[in-house]
Amino acid sequence: MQTKQEENSPIVREYIVGDTKYIVKASVKEAATEDAATKIRRLIRNDIGKQKTQNNDV
């Protein structure tokens, strides 16, 4: 049986995409609307979008 603290402890994962390392701390919320893979894809897309915008500003 898990304690409350164990259930709420985040899971830490590292993802390397190109030259960027993403460190993800994941915890589960009852009201979550997306799974971890979907969220990571969204975060990466947002990061790429920011990089493109910054490159266009130069």
Image (cartoon, rainbow, N blue to C red):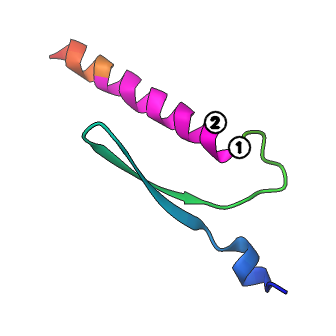
Residue 12 in picture, x, y percent from top left: 52, 64
Q: Is residue 49 above or below residue 21?
A: above
Residue 26 in picture, x, y percent from top left: 60, 58
Q: What residue is rendered at 31% in x and 18% in y?
A: 53
Residue 25 in picture, x, y percent from top left: 54, 60
Figure quadrant of residue 57: top left
How many other residues sit within 10 Å of disc 2, few (<14), some (14-19) or many (≥20)?
few
Figure quadrant of residue 9: bottom right
Q: Circle 2 is placed at which residue position?
A: 38
Residue 24 in picture, x, y percent from top left: 49, 55
Figure quadrant of residue 35: top right
Label 1 sits on what residue type?
Answer: Asp
Q: Is residue 24 above or below residue 43?
A: below
Q: Is residue 40 above or below residue 42?
A: below
Residue 2, magenta (yes or no):
no
The boundaries of the magenta stretch are 35-51
Q: What residue is rendered at 39% in x and 22% in y?
A: 49
Q: What residue is rendered at 49% in x and 59% in y?
A: 13
- Report the front residue among 46 and 37: 37
Q: Quadrant of the N terminus?
A: bottom right
State if disc 2 and disc 1 touch (CB < 8 Å): yes
Residue 39, magenta (yes or no):
yes
Q: Circle 1 is placed at which residue position?
A: 35
